[in-house]
Amino acid sequence: MKRTCAVAALACAMLLSGCATAPGKIYDPFEASNRAMFAINEPIMEYVAKPIAQFYVAVTPSFFRTAVSNYVNNIDDLFSIVNDALQGKWDKMGNDMGRVMINTGFGFGGLIDIASDAGIPRGMEDFGQTFGYWGIPQGPYLFIPLWGPTTVRDGTGSILRLVWSPTNEIPNVAVRNVVYGLVTVNEAPGAVDAMKLVDQASLDPYTFVRRSYLQRREYLVHDGKPPPEKDDQ
Amino acid sequence: MTRFTMNLLRGLLPIGLAFLATAAFAQEAPDVLVKRVAGEVLTIIKSDPKVQAGDQQRIREVVESKLLPYFDFERITALAMGRNWRQANAEQQKQLVDQFRALLVRTYSGALAQYRDQQMDYKPLRSDANATEVTVRTEVIRSGQAPVQIDYAMEKTPSGWKVYDVIVGGVSLVTNYRDEFNEQIKNGGVDNLIKTLQAKNSK
């Protein structure tokens, strides 16, 4: 079932991305509905995410929150190994394999990030970047409430990441659900802070978030060296 | 070429290099400048009790006096305007620069107020000595979080090196605002953009 989902999502992404424009250009054919979703997101952030974030920060010590993000990062590193391989980035793959082994083995299943302290950098590759590396364009931009900005290509990558996450394999249902919950709530404080900054900086938060997201992803696909944009001055 | 001239040249070469180095030193190198200014601002933020207490007025003063002199707001605004810059008349251009500067100062001061213990790392500058445009790369390290790359695109001006774009984790400030500005101009011309900026700043 999960595998069918993933394959179907991938096929959809390829199809939809196929009719996109050149990279660097913004392709937002669903702008009207995206803007509606963005508008829905704002009160959700203000009246749901923000109180939850404040409560969560108040009741948990910071080492606990760090442990939760280390857990998520460790799984990201695991997926990074796969994506390093899919892009033939062997140096990064070596680093990520070392990281996952060290952090899973000696860091209580990834709760402590010993590898970063040892100076092993994260590869930070994901499926969306691999698709980009293969030349698949972003496809339509999407804004999803509580999830945030994405595109058909990157969103497909995120679905693969969720479907194949080792968290799904935790045998005890109660434990698994607690982990799902923590991992989600742990994102809230950062997201709330980010939205605050966007509101302060932008004339139109929607375009601001869209351009930031697309720039950031382009930067990651090119490992921090994106080709210069051909913009008029 | 005789051996004598070769040796003479070899002997003179270091002198020539030393001369060039002195000429370059007349102006503070861009990476040295970024390091010095960032260091000064961080010291104030860590030690000033008013800043620590979140006094927005004081934080803005620090930004205005310590950071602003090293930013070329005219160029930043012109770049963010793109092809619309030439559409604006001198008066509009002046207003745009003023309003945009105010917006950036406000935003940056707000971000600084949330300052937690952070550490800055400076990457070696890779550019040749005659370059008139360079990118100074830095990294902000926060405990327990992924490091953030902050790059400063800088140009050489008669009054020293000035920043004309800040790129945070691959997100260029100028590029981001170009979309925003375009949208406002499309919906009502340059005056609409000025009006929107003013409204935003007076909130």
Image (cartoon, coloured by chain):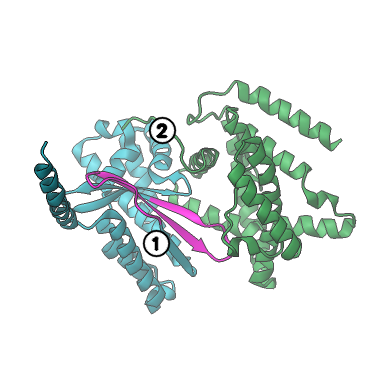
Chain colours: A green, B cyan
Does residue A151 show up?
no
At x 68%, y 28%, the residue is A13
Range of residues picked out in magenta? B123-151
Is residue B132 on the magenta stretch? yes
- Amino acid bearing label 2: Glu
Sort mark 1 into few (<14), some (14-19) or many (20+) by Cα contacts within 10 Å.
Answer: many
B80 vs A111, left or right, is: left
> Which element is circle 2 on?
loop
How far across and how far down the image is residue A83, in percent? 66, 40
| Residue at the far right in the pictured view | A172
* Vertical comparison of B5 with B142: above or below: above
> Which of label 2 and label 1 is nearer to you?
2
Quarter of the view holding residue A99: bottom right
Q: CA distance from mark 2 to mark 1?
A: 29 Å
Q: Nearer the viewer, residue A161 or A125?
A: A125
At x 45%, y 47%, the residue is A202
The residue indicated by pointer 2 is A229
Query: Which subunit holds the residue at mark 2?
Result: A
Quarter of the view holding residue A137: top right
At x 67%, y 60%, the residue is A70
How far across and how far down the image is residue B63, in percent? 32, 63
Is residue B44 on the magenta stretch? no
Query: Which subunit holds the residue at mark 1?
Result: B
Does residue B87 show up?
yes
Q: Are marks 2 and 1 in contact (CB under 8 Å)?
A: no
| Residue at the far top in the pictured view | A19
The residue indicated by pointer 1 is B109
B174 vs A171, left or right, is: left
- Amino acid bearing label 1: Ser
Q: Quadrant of the C terminus of chain A?
A: top left
At x 37%, y 42%, the residue is B174
